[in-house]
Amino acid sequence: MPYAPWKTWKEFTDWAKKNPGAAKIGITGAKSTDVKGIALWQVEKRENMKLTYVAFKGSADVLTNILGGHVTAYAASIDPSTMSYIKEGKLRPLLYLCKEKMPGYENLPSTEELYGIRVANFMGIFGPKNLPEYVLTKLDRAFAQAVKDPKFIMVMDQMLTPVVYLPRAKMKELVEKNFVDLSKAIKDLKSEEAKEKK
């Protein structure tokens, strides 16, 4: 029997609005340093609800605490460690913080769809500054080919990680845009935290 009474994101937000501060969200690190915490803080403002953030050292600690009923929700990745509990009905995903969705859970909403807020999970290959253009071009082609390899796709499937390939120029554009958006959100969040301390 799942600990939480809600089955959808809307049911959760309706409950959170009626019970300000009662929803304890487990995250790794402080709200202003965890991208998931920053995203949920923005959602909190849009929904006009009050959440309580509980910082943990790592995702394993958060998982233990939500399974024990000590926190209300868990902002985390769906990976093999959480999927087994989802399949057993001990955890229930409510909302995606990213654009990509897991097979079988496509009907769940995302923060991007509902609020225009997205948590970018950058997993890429980075090299030293000033690599020659011919090297970058060769690497671009190699990685574009590598992500199509069935063995690579199989490993990514096992990790429950969707394969999303972006060429170098697109990746650079996405990183730079995300940096600007995230910087603004962090500045606004820290400004609000400073006001609350006064």
Image: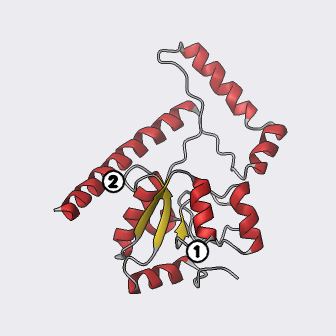
> Is 6 left, or right, of 154 in this rendering?
left
Of labels 1 and 2, earlier in sequence is 1
Classify mark 1: helix, strand or loop.
loop
Label 1, label 2: how far apart the Cα atoms are? 30 Å
Q: Which residue is mark 2?
A: 185
Q: Which x, y percent locates residue 163? A: 69, 46
- Indicate the quadrant where residue 109 lies: bottom right
Residue 103 in sight here: no
Residue 53 lies in quadrant: bottom left
| Residue ID for mark 1 | 69
Residue type at tag 2: Ala
Find residue 33 and report its horizontal and vertical position in percent.
40, 49
Rendered residue at 83%/40% (across/down):
150
- Rendered residue at 55%/57% (across/down): 98
Whether residue 15 is visible to the viewer of this picture, yes or no, is yes
Say if 165 sits above or below 158 in the image: above
Q: Quadrant of the N terminus?
A: bottom right
Q: Are marks 1 and 2 in contact (CB under 8 Å)?
A: no
Q: Specify the farthest residue to the left.
A: 198
* Image location of residue 106, percent across then percent down: 67, 67
Q: Secondary structure at mark 2?
A: helix
Front-most of residues 33 and 136: 33
The one of 74 and 144 positioned closer to us in this rendering: 74
Query: Pointer 2: residues within 10 angstroms few (<14), some, or many (20+)?
Result: some
Give the colour scheme shown.
Answer: secondary structure
Mark 1: which amino acid? Gly
Label 1 neighbourhood size at 10 Å, few (<14), some (14-19), many (20+)? Answer: few
Q: Residue at x 23, y 55 (%)?
A: 191
Position of residue 139 relative to residue 186, above or below, is: above
